[in-house]
Amino acid sequence: MFTDPSRFPSRPVPSRRGSPRAVSLALLAATATLALVMTAACGGEAQQGSAGGQASGASAAAETTTGTASVGALAGAASAATAVAPVASGAAVTIEAYLDPSDPAGKMYLAETMPKIAQRYSGQVATNVHALPRPQLQESIQIAEALFCAGEQGKYDSFLDKIIASQELPSEEWVKKTGTAAGVDPAALQECIGKGTGRELVKKAFAAAQEARIRALPTFIVAGERIESMWATEVALNTLDRLLGRESEIEPIKLTVVYDPACQSCKDEDFLAEIQRNVYPKLDAKRLASDSMEGASLLKQAGITALPAFLFDPAIESVSSFAGIRPMFEKRPQGLYITPAQYPGPITLAATPSIELAVNRGSAEAPVVVTEFSDFLCPHCKHFAETIAPGLMEKFVDTGKVRFQFFPFPLGDNRVVYSQAALCVGKLKSDAFWGYHDALFANQERLDRNVAIELAEKAGLARPAFEQCLEDKGLTEQIKTTKNKIADEQFVTSTPTLYVNRLRVKGIHSVDELARYIDEQAPRGGK
């Protein structure tokens, strides 16, 4: 029973959880994890959001002999050591699970992974679950308040069960219905929430997590090791087998990687390691160079145009967390193919992108072409335009080393007007384009159609001609068609996305970083 507001809610593995429950994993945190956070970018319509919440810190220790951990005990243990104290049961391994029970990853751990741990390692492994909301989501906080208030009535476990099973978005009615189903007194529950008691308990839980230096949800401290992906069943079982000195029962999944031997930046090892850490721990990878007979034949058969290419054995579909990463894959006769649009690292195409509507700057004879796909309402695009592009122009474009190709890639139909406005300026007064480009970004926070017209007039364009171009439905459709073609052929789903010749790069933070890719793509003996 959770009655002391200075206590942090936790509970050991319940033996009554014998079978996994069905849980919708469409927003599984693996999708966000596998993105590798390699890029600062604005997402397109098809982009998924992050499923994991954020707290603060780096490693945790907890006093678990009573089944709960106080704020003071957590803070003291965290400052003294990183090892997790053994539980009173004498279990060989203790798992401290910090998670949001309303999050798909948290639900998966509670409903599927934790029962399998209890079944496979009976008496050897103990789990203490520390329920926390994701601080950026009001719905998550609302659920946590209700959960903690249910704990005040001794109904913490039963209310938690209802959270795990629920697929509904929380509301006041949901709290009442769920509380009643869990055996909670609805009037007392609403009083606890209304008086702010639940919110205070949430604050104390956050304070304890911060003292324990927990940075993200879910996070698991397993025998002193910090592991963020223990919610995935195969990762959890493989980790525990290792810690307990048992032979792993996890079978390797085969995949084929076709790589571009000419690309120095196309390192796929980190991506595969990320899959092993967060999705499935054992992969049996066969590597083929794209210029080998077998590699070239496989690419042709599978219709693959970008490298590196990953083709997984269909056995990957049986992995517990596959539902969360399903959008990354396409089915091909040769296997499950990770689409280049979903792959976060550098990729190479057969040729440098050539965009009919793009605006170019620099020498047509330059040996390197840098292509930017940008959205005028994207904050990261504004950052690139104002802090990186000027150095790119000065060091490379104006010196004839690089031709810069720019296409305004609207992330939504409501943004097409700004792409069209820029292209109209380029069409009607080409020497005003780059100044207008800069002005759109400079006025990003107040940008609307009237501001776009106002800025065009300041750039010296006649309003009637500009507005006529802005209303040109043919140009509007051409922009949309070009954008869709770029998404399909150049695998652009977020902005800014850059190509250096045929190499796609993301997450560029400085001119020096971009310069390394330019130097890599420059012909030998010339830069």
Image (tube, rainbow, N blue to C red):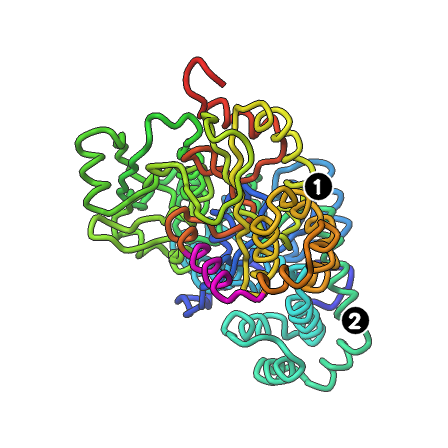
Q: Secondary structure at mark 1?
A: helix
Q: Is residue 191 above or below residue 240?
A: below
Q: Is residue 472 magenta?
A: yes
Q: Which residues are magenta?
A: 471-484
Q: Position of residue 132 (x, y in %)?
A: 65, 60
Q: Is residue 6 magenta?
A: no
Q: Is residue 157 above or below residue 117?
A: below
Q: Position of residue 520 (x, y in %)?
A: 46, 23
Question: Can residue 70 be seen?
Answer: no
Closer mark to the observer between disc 2 and disc 1 = 2
Q: Residues within 10 Å of mark 2 (few under 14, many from 20)?
A: some
Q: Which mark is residue 78?
A: 1
Q: Is residue 127 above or below residue 195?
A: above
Gap between marks 2 and 1 measured at Cα: 27 Å
Q: Which mark is residue 197?
A: 2
Residue in the image at 46% along x and 55% along y: 483
Residue 81 in which image quadrant: top right
Q: Secondary structure at mark 2?
A: helix
Cβ–Cβ below 8 Å for labels 2 and 1?
no
Tell me if 312 is positioned left or right of 320 in this view: left
Residue with the most extreme top position: 525
Residue in the image at 58% along x and 70% along y: 160
Which of the two labelled residues, at mark 2 and mark 1, occupies the earlier sequence position? 1
Tell me if 193 is positioned left or right of 33 in this view: right
Q: Residues within 10 Å of mark 1 (few under 14, many from 20)?
A: many
Q: Nearer the viewer, residue 340 or 504?
A: 504
Q: Position of residue 399 (x, y in %)?
A: 58, 23
Q: Amino acid at mark 2?
A: Thr
